[in-house]
């Protein structure tokens, strides 16, 4: 006879309500692991979407994501002539905000050269950019439709949405959009008409628009990328980063503070969950003092009583974990940020839950072992 099962069956309503509350708490712990995974994936998405071997940026910077980088537009031609470089493309990166129907829309714009590295990856609807001006490919998260016109820049140029992507966002959650390099340079470096007239009236020199943030290079498979990076870095005005270095910067530096915050919140929730389970098990054990005393009075060994408490604690934790996991996946589509789960993270949370239940059952076990068998007679009297 399984005493834990019979006790849960006898108090099924209380167990179910307790399990529901615990599942919400464990669901939040699971959700945070998904937020953390999504944050890492979003941070690396732009770098991986470029499918680059090398990133050539301004000297002494860790651009173009971790730091600002600005180099001449003809740098791409210089990089293309370096031994080992198969293809190269100039790119720009900038955040913009526009309004459509009175609602603000924030986009992360990537400017690229048609037919060269740095352009959009998989397009789920629509087509590639074919015209040299005023066409845009945007992530579906922006809420824009094919054929819709989007005003961008101080001059109010309207860009037509010709393609849609899926899950192309930044670490901040902003949808990514692609336009041609010339359009991106105009948006990033051109002054508004009033500012242009003011600079001309003052006799100041207008800033050249032929500037970019980075050059993306594809290296021959027969030439080590590190050798090409070393050769490029000999030019004092340039720094070359490998794809591995760029991903390290994004995952370990750019989102370092946010990563630590997520980890701290998860640790605190795990501690709170352990305390709550310990209190629940302690309370459930107090309610069974008479039953435990009776078991001791009829000669039940301590391991039977300890097994009862541990089984109830594990049942509570496992049921709460499964219910919390189910709730997270049910409401996952409605979450404002992408939740990315990998089997290792889900398994780690499950193991933490089991360990947490075993530790939390210590209070109940101590109480049960201190129960005097004579209490069975005293209570019944």
Image (cartoon, rainbow, N blue to C red):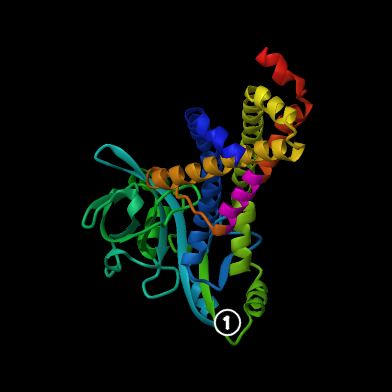
Residue at the top extreme, as displayed: 381
Left or right, residue 159 beside residue 35: left
The one nearer the camera, 247 or 310, is 310
Q: How crowded is mark 1: few (under 14 residues within 10 Å), some or many (20 or more)?
A: some
**Residue 226, position in %: x, y?**
66, 76
Is residue 285 visible to us here?
yes
Q: Where is residue 46 in the image (x, y as percent from the top left)?
A: 48, 60
State whether the magenta stretch is mostly helix, strand or loop.
helix
Q: Quickly name the residue at label 1.
A: 82
| Residue at 60% in and 56% down | 251
How many badges with numbers are in the image? 1
- Quadrant location of residue 313? top right
* Residue drawn at (54%, 45%) of the image: 30
In the rendered image, the vertical position of residue 231 relative to residue 124, given as above or below: below
Q: Furthest-bottom residue in view?
A: 222
Q: Where is residue 243 in the image (x, y as percent from the top left)?
A: 58, 68
> Could you say which quadrant of the image residue 129 lies in?
bottom left
Image quadrant for the C terminus? top right
Residue 58 visible somewhere in the drawing: no
In this view, the residue farthest toward the left is 147
State which quarter of the image contains the N terminus.
top right
**Residue closest to the far front:** 298
Q: Which of 133 and 376 is in front in this view?
A: 376
4 lies left or right of 136? right
Of 352 and 49, nearer the camera is: 352
First to last magenta residue range: 344-354
Does residue 231 lie above or below 320 as drawn? below
Q: Name the secondary structure under disc 1.
A: loop
Residue 347 shown in magenta: yes
Tell me where residue 221 appears, x and y as whole percent: 56, 84
Is residue 5 part of the magenta span, yes or no?
A: no
């Amino acid at each position: 006879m399984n005493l834990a099962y019979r006790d849960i069956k006898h108090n099924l309503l209380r167990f179910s309500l307790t399990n529901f509350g615990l599942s919400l708490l464990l669901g939040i712990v699971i959700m945070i692991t998904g937020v953390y995974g999504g944050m890492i994936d979003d941070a690396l998405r732009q770098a991986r979407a470029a499918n680059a071997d090398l990133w050539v940026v301004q000297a002494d910077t860790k651009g173009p994501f971790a730091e600002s980088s600005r180099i001449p537009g003809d740098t791409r031609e210089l990089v293309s002539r370096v031994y080992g470089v198969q293809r190269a493309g100039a790119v720009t990166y900038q955040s913009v905000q526009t309004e459509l129907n009175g609602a603000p829309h924030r986009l992360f714009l990537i400017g690229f050269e048609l037919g060269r590295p740095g352009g959009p990856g998989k397009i789920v609807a629509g087509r590639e950019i074919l015209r040299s001006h005023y066409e845009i490919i945007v992530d579906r998260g922006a809420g824009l439709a094919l054929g819709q016109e989007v005003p961008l820049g101080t001059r109010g140029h309207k860009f037509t949405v010709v393609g849609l992507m899926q899950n192309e966002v930044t670490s901040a959650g902003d949808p990514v959009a692609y336009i041609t390099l010339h359009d991106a340079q105009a948006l990033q470096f051109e002054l508004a008409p009033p500012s242009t007239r003011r600079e001309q009236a003052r006799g100041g020199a207008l800033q050249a628009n032929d500037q970019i943030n980075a050059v993306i290079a594809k290296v021959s498979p027969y030439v080590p990328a590190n050798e090409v990076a070393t050769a490029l870095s000999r030019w004092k005005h340039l720094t070359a980063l490998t794809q591995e270095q760029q991903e390290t910067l994004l995952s370990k530096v750019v989102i370092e503070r946010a990563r630590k915050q997520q980890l701290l919140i998860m640790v605190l929730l795990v501690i709170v969950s352990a305390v709550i389970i310990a209190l629940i098990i302690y309370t459930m054990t107090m309610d069974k003092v008479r039953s435990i005393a009776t078991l001791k009075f009829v000669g039940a060994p301590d391991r039977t009583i300890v097994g009862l408490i541990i089984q109830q604690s594990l049942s509570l934790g496992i049921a709460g974990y499964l219910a919390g996991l189910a709730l997270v996946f049910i409401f996952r589509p409605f979450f404002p940020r992408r939740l990315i789960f990998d089997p290792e993270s889900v398994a780690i949370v499950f193991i933490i839950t089991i360990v947490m239940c075993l530790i939390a059952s210590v209070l109940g076990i101590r109480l049960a072992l201190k129960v005097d068998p004579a209490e069975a007679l005293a209570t019944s009297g």
